[in-house]
Image (cartoon, rainbow, N blue to C red):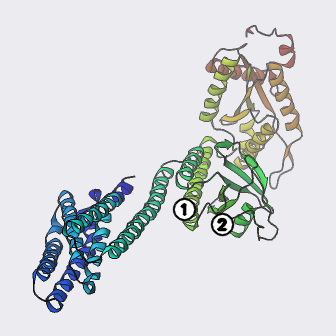
Amino acid sequence: MDMLRRLASPQNLPIHEVQQIIRPGFVGVFLLCIVLAAFTVFTLPGGETQFRILFLAVLGTVYSAVHILWFAKLPYQQMVFQGLLLVIYAGLSIITLLWIPTSLLTIPAAVILLVITLTSLLLGRRAAYVYMGLVLLGFTLVNWLTGASQNTAPGIWAISILTIVIVEFVASMLNVNNHHIRRLQTINEFSRQINSTIEREHVLSILGDAIQKAIEADTYFMGVGLGRDRLYLELVYDDGAYFPPQEINMAGTLSGWVVRNQSSLFIPDLRRDVNLEGVQVILTGNNRDSACWMGVPMKAGSINGVLAVASYTPNAFDRTALELLENLAQHTALALDNANHHSEVEAQARLDSLTEVYNHGYIVHILRQVLEKARSSGAPLSLVMLDIDHFKQYNDVYGHQVGDEVLVRLAQAIKQHIKATDSVGRWGGEEFTIVLPNASGSQASQVALRLQETLRTLSLHPQDEKTLPFPTISQGIAVFPNDAEDGDSLIQLADRRLYIAKNRGRNQVEPGIAYWEKSIPGTKNEQ
């Protein structure tokens, strides 16, 4: 916004920038005054008329020269004073139309038009129109008071029309520049914000705000490709409302064309047939027909998708809007790729590098989270601690490679027997922890028994060795809130029960299924 204010008012521009804008106009006034003085000396007979015109020409020459050479060093406040002097001088110039011969009328007229241009640049559109009105009023009064016989009305009206043309042209150019600057401002601000975050949801939020500020679109969406034919729309906005993410088939769609060809697509009027082979329009959001559509590819690292905007009004966008959308898409793709990398690094930091289940620190973190949810909802929470029987023997006899294979395959087997809402972590060495939200002791026991059955079917095939049976496991189960009321107590009880299972002969689950069947719900089990 600072840039927009600077462009809208010379007061906020550095003095040298203002001078660069208005100096050519003053040079033009200087040259025109010299031409007027020369023609006055050589073409007009001596007398009062020649004196008046020559005086005005010399005055304009001196004023322009002083401005070019010295006024360039003045601050803005004195430059406004220059503008007022400019208006006064132009007023004097228009009075000369009452006396000047027809052959010389074009020179003061050109001076007046230049002054109008400088006024609109230096003081603004409104000041230029005020100046024009005052000049017309002054001319009318002088013409009436002097009773001048020369008919200069056509010239005055011609200058007035040209004034309107010049002022509106300058204003439109400033508006166009403001529009471009606003879009550049949006891109710069968007780039600054989006590069400061590594959260995917925040990236999408910043993108939505930027599109609404910079492009007058009724609907927009951002989608990321899933394989060859599917597109996952993460950000869907239509007619003032956001919609849940959705997955669509890219085949035959405008978005699919953009992703497949890695090229921007701009269709000013969708009401006409879309001249793209095999493409049909698919509606999202409110399923309302769009009339104007733009889509650009998003490609960076792991990101391959599309960013699209649409309007219910035909020809609502232009090529500059398309360039802006391309910039937004490029920045967004890079930000999303960075977010993906960050998520991957975070995910890896939570995992055990060998078994790819949660490490000790993160499984403790998960246990605390689900325990708080269970406490507030009153639902049970089961914890299973398990340990591989005779694991040290496998390592010592068959080597660490076989031991690592045992750990990896056990982790895979555990994942097969738990739900997406459950969690498994490597507690340390050959010991694992399973967190089962909303699971009773009986349900946890069934998970433990099924895991034992699966391990009986597994075998190991070390190099140059005969086939080995997969080692057994011992498991201990504790349940919140019946067995313990906090996380530490739950862990300690499950660990204690694990070692009871080991001491009982290994390949055991403690407590057994019979214990849970006779337990009374809602009472604390003593151990």
Q: Which residue lies furthest to the bottom in this view?
A: 42
Disc 2 packing (10 Å; few <14; some 14–19; many ≥20): some
Residue 324: give its label.
1
Circles 2 and 1 in contact, beta carbons < 8 Å? no
Helix, strand or loop at label 2? It is strand
Disc 1 packing (10 Å; few <14; some 14–19; many ≥20): some
Compared across the picture, whether 76 is left or right of 486 comes to left
Compared across the picture, whether 204 is left or right of 390 comes to left
On-image quarter of the C terminus:
top right
Compared across the picture, whether 420 is left or right of 351 comes to right
Q: How far from the left and from the top, in percent, is residue 133?
A: 31, 61
Residue type beneath disc 2: Phe
The answer to whether 372 is drawn above or below residue 297 in the figure is: above
Q: How far from the left and from the top, in percent, is residue 417?
A: 82, 35
Q: How far from the left and from the top, in percent, is residue 286?
A: 74, 46
Q: Which of 465 and 95 is in front in this view?
A: 95
Residue type beneath disc 1: Leu
Q: How far apart are marks 2 and 1 (CA)?
A: 13 Å
Helix, strand or loop at label 1? It is helix
Q: How far from the left and from the top, in percent, is residue 297?
A: 65, 63
| Label located before the other in sequence (2 or 1) | 2
Which residue is found at the position 61% from the left and 35% from the top?
362
Which residue is found at the position 63% from the left and 27% from the top?
369
Quadrant of the rendered image containing residue 151: bottom left
Compared across the picture, whether 364 is left or right of 273 comes to left
The residue that mark 2 highlights is: 266
Q: Nearer the viewer, residue 282 or 479?
A: 282
